[in-house]
Amino acid sequence: MNFHGKDIKIFAGNASKKVAESIAENLSLKTGASVVKKFSDGEISVSLNESVRGSDCFIVQSTCAPVNDNLMEILIMIDAMKRASAASITVVMPYYGYARQDRKAKARDPITAKLCADLITSAGADRVLTMDLHANQIQGFFNIPVDHLYGAGLLADHMKSKIGDNANEWIVVSPDLGSVTRSRNFAEKIGTGLAIIDKRRPEPNVSEVMNIIGDAKGKKVILVDDMIDTAGTLCNAANAIVERGGATEVYACATHAVLSGDAIKNIKNSVIKELVLLDTIPVPPEKMLDNFTILSVGELFANAIKRIYEDEPVSPLYTK
């Protein structure tokens, strides 16, 4: 399998044009000339307006809403490049949709994360580059190499600049038991303690706080999660850590801003002072709030692409 063509070409899907432009700029390139649009009946049309023969092609596309359209864009772009004799095709997915359907939670459930992996592989992709998969085992769903980057380093650097030399005044809080490892690693990065919120889910997208494990009284809290969907878990945790845990201020960090349903309403009505997000999913202007801080992932992905193209290890970028 050849991962070293004559040059690098960065192509953007409709969901990730800004990230693709940032990646290309960090590589001193321009994004590839392509048009991705729809026919009148809703079918997706892809036109590559430059040669990709012998090139290492990187398709930058998150499978965020509209998830199915963005996934089909990826599959059709892969097919177009494969038929145009690209040397290799890497799918750069800052956000991997359907990742929460990674196992059978009950009888007769599909494992859609595996299905999506099969579709991308069957379409002809040679490699996948992604960030903060909801479940690490999804890497094993692919029969091609998967490079899995972590956004925690970018978020931690931002929070370090805010904390300064006052780490003893802060504490990282995991919003649920599933995020404990991520939160512990984050706390080690910024040099603070750790607390955990124990919650239960009576139904999908609904969470209730049961207990707080650890001492956040009188401290500024940093909540860490991989994604914010309806923001119910995050906002319940923020309110509980102030009302029941005695925290003075609450900040939150997350990689993926899914922001579906009542997310914006929930965040507006919460005690969260600042919400730091990465731009793996574009936040539309109508959803931007004054307390949002958006950090770019372009440079990190550009470094990974450069390493892949130059046959260097990507592992030095795997910081959790």
Image: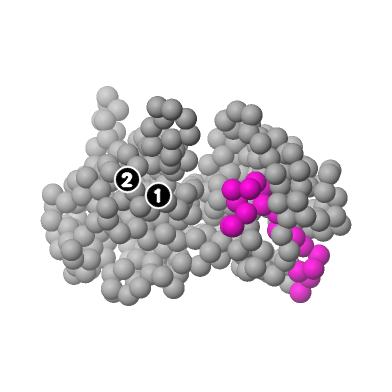
Indicate the position of residue 78 as horizontal and vertical percent values.
23, 48
Residue 95 seen by the camera: yes
Disc 1 on helix, strand or loop? helix
* Residue projecting furthest to the top: 41
Residue 1 falls in which quadrant of the image?
bottom left
- Residue 169, magenta (yes or no): yes
**Marks 1 and 2, how far apart in space?**
8 Å
Q: Is residue 50 left or right of residue 139?
A: left
Determine whether 233 is above or below 156 in the image: above
Identified by mark 2, the residue type is Ala
Q: Residue at x 42, y 47 (%)?
A: 96
Determine whether 82 is above or below 75 in the image: below
Q: Residue at x 41, y 30 (%)?
A: 109
Magenta residues, as a range?
165-182
Mark 2 and mark 1 in contact (Cβ < 8 Å)? yes
| Front one among 33 and 231 | 231
Residue assigned mark 2? 117
Residue assigned mark 1? 138
| Front one among 6 and 153 | 153
Determine whether 60 is above or below 28 in the image: above
Identified by mark 1, the residue type is Ile
Indicate the position of residue 83 as horizontal and vertical percent values.
13, 49
